[in-house]
Image (cartoon, rainbow, N blue to C red):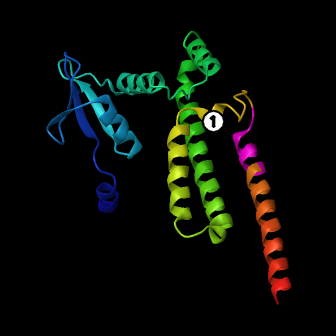
Amino acid sequence: MQETAQSSPQPVIVKKYANRRLYNTESSSYITLENLAGMVRDNRDFVVYDAKSGEDITRSVLTQIIVEEEGKGNALLPVNFLRQLIGVYGTDMPSLMPKYLEQAMANFMRQQENVRETMSKTLGPFMPPGMEDMSRKNMAMMERAMTLFSPFYGAEGKPGQSVAQDYQEEILSLRAEVERLQGELAAMRTKGK
């Protein structure tokens, strides 16, 4: 039991003041929304409270971070998805939606991890020194970019396409390419002997 408590630190408490400033109680310093976005990317949990009322406003602050990211040109949320999401607010679906979105995102992240592991196992032996590290950094950057609701849209942004199926097809394609390259290497080695 103690291991679990030690491995998952308590969330950082952030207070938001009337002047819209955010105060990190852990570091005793003022921070920005960008700092909070960095904490999210670093998997550091936090809770934001209104300094005056004590109300938990974490959800609205996270939404504000998304709005800022979208405004910076990091548009990950397709317009049709945003319209559909807004449309859900006027129905009886809002009670089901949060759980569905959480599960879909968790599934997406698991699929990303599976793709990364498969790519590493499949292509690792063929990469020149240093290339694997660069690929890992590129993959991490892609994963960060894909973390906002992308699982609802396929490669073309069309609802209903199976992301898992797209990845499986891509993996099969990559495996076929690796097998072709291995065949060429074997043929070259045979010629050289």
Q: Disc 1 designates what residue?
A: 151
Residue extending farthest to the left is 28
Q: Residue at x 58, y 18 (%)?
A: 82
Mark 1 burial class by Cα count in 10 Å: few <14, some 14-19, many 20+: many
Q: Quadrant of the C terminus?
A: bottom right
Viewer-proximal residue, 140 or 54? Answer: 140
Relative horizontal placement of residue 106, taking residue 9 as reference (left or right): right
Please say if 125 is above or below 13.
Answer: below
Q: In x, y percent, where is residue 104?
A: 60, 37
User: Which residue is at a point 85% across and 78% down the rendered structure image?
Assistant: 187
Q: Residue at x 30, y 55 (%)?
A: 5
Residue 158, above or below 103: above
Residue 112, position as x, y percentages in the image: 60, 49
Q: Is residue 162 magenta?
A: yes
The answer to which quarter of the image holds residue 41 is top left
Q: Which residues are magenta?
A: 161-169
From what the image shows, is residue 166 above or below residue 60?
below
Quarter in which the N terminus is drawn: bottom left
Q: Secondary structure at mark 1?
A: helix
**In terms of image quadrants, where is residue 2?**
bottom left
Q: How many marks?
A: 1
Task: Answer with left or right where residue 183 lies relative to residue 64.
Answer: right
Magenta segment includes 39: no
Tell me residue 11's x, y (percent): 29, 42
Residue sticking out furthest to the bottom: 193
